[in-house]
């Protein structure tokens, strides 16, 4: 019988030893969001003099880290990020050359980056958190994210596993074996959490329009934020809902407890919550831990539109920053300023439409900045990233209604979107549409 404890002990290094063993120039990939590599990310700036240039790849940094925020480290480190969080936004806003955005669709994020790094001749390092090892079989668990982590482990030249006893065990394609690791470090830290955002009256009005589009037996992809939370609260009376989603959220537990989610009528993976990462509260992490009803699979699979489309009655619900009168959706930037990321929005929106009786829904408040700006605009602000192209846009919902745009002409789209814009802006939107030749 193999002695996996001896194998583990033979690869165990201190944080300093493991960091100093890395090449002086490399691309080091972190785990995502709740599974970010807290030990590495909080210490790497202490070893700046050891490196010539280190590219640190991450997705939705949850905490503040000097290596990607302190201008003293410009030129030494670069945080290449698939999805900006608050710290990335601040560093970019101040003009520090410490962060860069990686345009992507979530299901292709890992594979495309691997190909790009190999084409550039980069040494690929994967450094990510895992559960403690099972002494019986040598397996560790990736925990709360497998968006790109499994792909990166397979492709990496060097694999360092950051063992954290706080990481929950998740069922699915989540195992990694000690034989796949070049080094192991131990670093215990609480898993990052986010609060449950309570919806206000406007979000509840938006949610009411969306809830009417969700029937019994629907399989759902629900995004994050107050609008999706409000939608979930209105679905507790539905029957036999299922989950096939990019991100597991708190509201899914509530819907399961209410009896609305059973996963029984799913045409793909019946009986299972299918997702690729989870981010929420400690309560949610405890609920997911060793839960046989959940299945965390690779993002390249979960978010593949052709996989999503295998779920009959699939409905995808995401949010946006702004939509123009032809149906171009921006969900990730403020003009030229990167705010968040594409994530899986286009993946799930397209996949839902391709499903039998499926719907892709984009939701947004009709105004921003305390009602001073319309989020439905004649044209997107200069430099805005188009997250969902107009030819892909299905349903749009605000507090004033929900309209379907697929198959509609430009003039029909403009009329429909103006009808769900805030009444204070409809006259000027109509005038702008006429000037642009849309009406």
Image: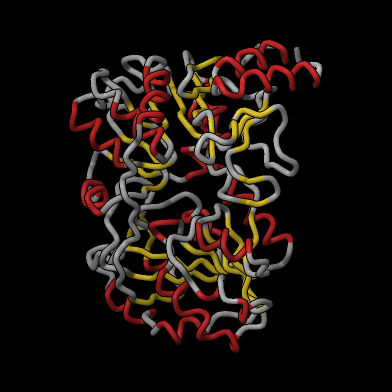
Q: Is residue 130 above or below residue 402?
A: below
Residue 370 appears in the picture as rendered: yes
Residue 227 image offset from top left, x and y in percent = 41, 33
Residue 24 image offset from top left, x and y in percent = 63, 82
Left or right: where does residue 348 sit relative to residue 260?
Answer: right
168 or 319, nearer to the observer? 319
Q: Is residue 438 above or below residue 118?
A: above
Residue 53 image offset from top left, x and y in percent = 66, 77
Left or right: where does residue 138 sit relative to residue 181?
Answer: left
Residue at 39%, 84% in the rendered image:
14
338 or 8, nearer to the observer? 338
Q: Quadrant of the N terminus?
A: bottom left
Residue 139 appears in the picture as rendered: no
Left or right: where does residue 6 sit relative to residue 63?
Answer: left
Residue at 56%, 70% in the rendered image:
68
Q: Is residue 205 above or below residue 127?
A: above
Left or right: where does residue 100 sit relative to residue 383?
Answer: left
> Quick one: which residue is furthest to the bottom in this view?
49
Q: Is residue 263 above or below residue 304?
A: above
Residue at 51%, 32% in the rendered image:
348
Residue at 67%, 17% in the rendered image:
414
């Amino acid at each position: 019988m193999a002695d996996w404890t001896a194998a583990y002990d033979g690869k165990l290094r201190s944080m300093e030893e493991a960091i100093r063993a890395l090449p002086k120039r490399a691309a080091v990939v972190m785990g995502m969001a709740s599974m970010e590599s807290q030990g590495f990310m909080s210490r790497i700036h202490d070893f700046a003099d050891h490196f010539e240039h280190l590219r640190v790849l991450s997705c939705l940094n949850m905490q503040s880290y000097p290596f990607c925020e302190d201008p003293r480290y410009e030129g030494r480190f670069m945080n290449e990020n698939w999805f900006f969080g608050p710290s990335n936004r601040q560093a970019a806003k101040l003009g520090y050359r410490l962060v860069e955005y990686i345009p992507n669709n979530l299901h292709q994020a890992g594979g495309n980056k691997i190909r790009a790094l190999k084409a550039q001749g980069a040494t690929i390092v994967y450094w990510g958190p895992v559960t403690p090892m099972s002494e019986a079989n040598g397996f560790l668990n990736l925990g709360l994210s497998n968006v790109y982590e499994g792909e990166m482990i397979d492709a990496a030249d060097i694999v360092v596993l950051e063992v954290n006893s706080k990481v929950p065990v998740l069922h699915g394609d989540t195992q990694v074996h000690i034989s796949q690791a070049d080094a192991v470090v131990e670093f215990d830290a609480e898993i990052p959490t986010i609060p449950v955002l309570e919806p206000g009256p406007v979000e509840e009005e938006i949610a009411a329009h969306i809830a009417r589009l969700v029937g019994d037996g629907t399989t759902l992809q629900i995004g994050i934020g107050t609008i999706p939370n409000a939608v979930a609260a209105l679905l507790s009376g539905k029957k036999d809902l299922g989950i096939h989603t990019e991100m597991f959220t708190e509201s899914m537990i509530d819907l399961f407890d209410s009896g609305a989610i059973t996963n029984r009528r799913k045409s793909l993976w019946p009986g299972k919550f299918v997702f690729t990462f989870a981010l929420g509260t400690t309560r949610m992490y405890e609920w997911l831990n060793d839960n046989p009803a959940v299945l965390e699979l690779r993002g390249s699979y979960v978010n593949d539109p052709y996989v999503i489309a295998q779920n009959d009655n699939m409905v995808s619900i995401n949010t946006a920053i702004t939509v123009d009168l032809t149906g171009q959706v921006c969900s990730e930037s403020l003009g030229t300023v990167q705010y968040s990321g594409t994530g899986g929005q286009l993946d799930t929106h397209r996949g839902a439409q391709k499903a039998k009786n499926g719907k892709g829904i984009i939701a947004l408040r009709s105004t921003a900045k305390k009602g001073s700006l319309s989020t439905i605009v004649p044209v997107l602000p200069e430099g805005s990233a188009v997250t969902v192209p107009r030819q892909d846009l299905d349903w749009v919902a605000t507090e004033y209604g929900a309209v379907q745009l697929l198959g509609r002409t430009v003039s029909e789209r403009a009329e429909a979107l103006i009808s769900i814009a805030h009444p204070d802006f409809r006259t000027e939107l109509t005038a702008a549409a006429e000037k642009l030749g849309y009406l």
